[in-house]
Amino acid sequence: MRRRRLLFSLLLVAAAGTVTAAVPQPGTAAPAATPLDRVIPAPASVRPAGDAFTLGAGTRIRVPGNSGEARQIAGYLAGLLRPATGFALPVTTRGGADGIVFRLGGRDTRGLGAEGYRLTSGGRAVTISAARPAGLFHGVQTLRQLLPAAVEKKSRQSGPWRIAGGTISDAPRYAYRGAMLDVSRHFFTVDQVKRYIDQLAQYKINKLHLHLSDDQGWRIVIDSWPRLATYGGSTQVGGGRGGHYSKDDYREIVRYAASRYLTVIPEIDMPGHTNAALASYADLNCNGEAPPLYTGTKVGFSSLCVPKKATYDFVDDVIREIAALTPGRYLHIGGDEAHSTAHADYVAFMDKVQPVVAKYGKTVIGWHQLTGAHPAKGALAQYWGYDKTGAEERQQVVDAAKRGTQLILSPADRAYLDMKYDKDSPLGLNWAGYVDVRRAYDWDPGSYLAGAPGSAVAGVEAPLWSETLTTSANIEYMAFPRLPGIAELGWSPARAHDWDAYRVRLAAQGPRWDAQGIGYYRAPEVAWPTR
Ligand code: ACM
């Protein structure tokens, strides 16, 4: 009791400014550097040590002379840091041990894998080492989060720009860390997609799954079936104008995503979710009649005509043209909610279509209903079930996993970013229930599907369906703050999983999003700093 009172009076004295030796003067005190353990996704290993490194007007970014990619990443980093710091931050291949130093390859990076990195900070340098450029890029995202949040602003700020001393050694738990954007229910422009890509990259997401076709809109030019885009893409949910990507638009998205170390995975959903295609070509319909375009939000009413030859001419052309535009190895063929396709037809359809994907050099991804057919060797199944998913359906997925089908986990009541947070959410749907921030984070992909071997889990994905979303602000309100939680499940080791620690790290992201102009949902279970 007495000790506590003594401590209290000392604090009072200190606050009054009469004790000066140990207490920095107001106005001259530099803010403490962000602790190394504030990063999202949580790094595999964090060891604080020694003095901070401070970014200054003379800081250079030193890159190895033999890597154009390293130089590009350095240019990207400089572009991020220049506006707020006001520093020139020249990128140089001149050797030296001070400043921001990139090291690529070399013996000490061998254990870091394709995407890992080591960041060492202290004294005159912060050094990022990696075996591959992707690791340098992910290290850069960590470096950003170690600087004060104001570094994310677009106008000059006062600093100081300190990075705490120590070492982070980091590599992902899963190779597949995805986000899906539905550009069919509402169309999003190339610039809107790029904005989302930049946000995903901050949390080390490495796959962008684009849901390019659905009942309400076909969003990419197919030269051999031109009406898909011009007519099938001419509207969207609610009846607005819709839109579509030219092939050059799509190439630009692929290029931009690659510059942020994300691979684009195109999805053409079939045999259901195909009204936009059926409306564009009468010949694709079993009765030879094209239905009208659809701008509502029902599901399960459309199907390609499984017995008809034209269907496979169409599928072959579409897959050929999309595969030719897509450098990544995966092509997603949907396969969900084919409620208007007889089961035998569904199986026959998938048996015919999966080899077409292989013929054009790609690997199939399908929604998990594909496991009710015959998933091709090497195919990935994306599980989107939730608590109400029937035991039989779940078991089908588990059995496929035991036979070697790899899984992407997107449980709808955890990972679907379009579910409402709670009953008051102004945007989103609630068919899988409400998904608050804790619920989105507090599960383990490795053990989520009881009975499926942990080794069958390729990773996680956070889908964002756009029935209720029309703007980037809408996307961001739903994705933030849940997306970083899914990203952490994909990247961080299982032993790092801890809601109480996570919510503190998450709160520290709020000022970064404010600085970036991201209008996130200030979820009540997180103690966000006051604005
Ligand atoms: C889905 O949500 N229908 C994959």
Image: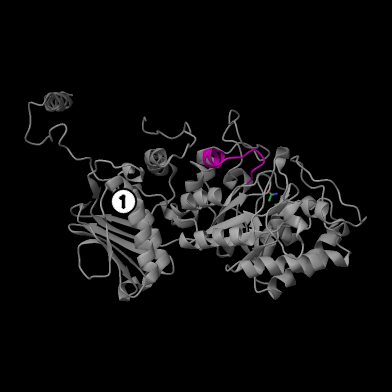
The magenta region covers 465-478
Q: Nearer the viewer, residue 384 or 269?
A: 269
Please name the residue shown 91% across and 57% down the image: 286
Q: Which percent across, then down, holds residue 79? A: 35, 54
Reading the image, the residue beneath label 1 is: 82
Seen from the viewer's position, the closer of residues 250 and 299 is: 250
Residue at image location 73% in from the left, 60% down from the top: 370
Residue found 55% across the figure and 65% down from its top: 455
Density class for disc 1 (Cα within 10 Å; few <14, some 14-19, many ≥20) is some
Q: Is residue 174 left or right of residue 137?
A: right
Is disc 1's CB within 8 Å of ligand 1? no
Residue 190, percent across and down? 57, 52
**The C terminus: image quadrant:** top left
Numbered disc 1: secondary structure: helix
Coordinates of residue 358 in the picture (x, y in percent): 69, 73
Residue in view at x 61 percent, y 66 percent: 326
> 213 left or right of 480?
right
User: Is 468 covered by the magenta stretch?
Assistant: yes
Question: Taking the image as drawn, is residue 181 in sight?
Answer: yes
Q: How many marks are shown on the rendered structure?
A: 1
What colour scheme was applied to this rendering of the protein? one colour
Q: Residue furthest right?
A: 287
Res. 170 in view? no
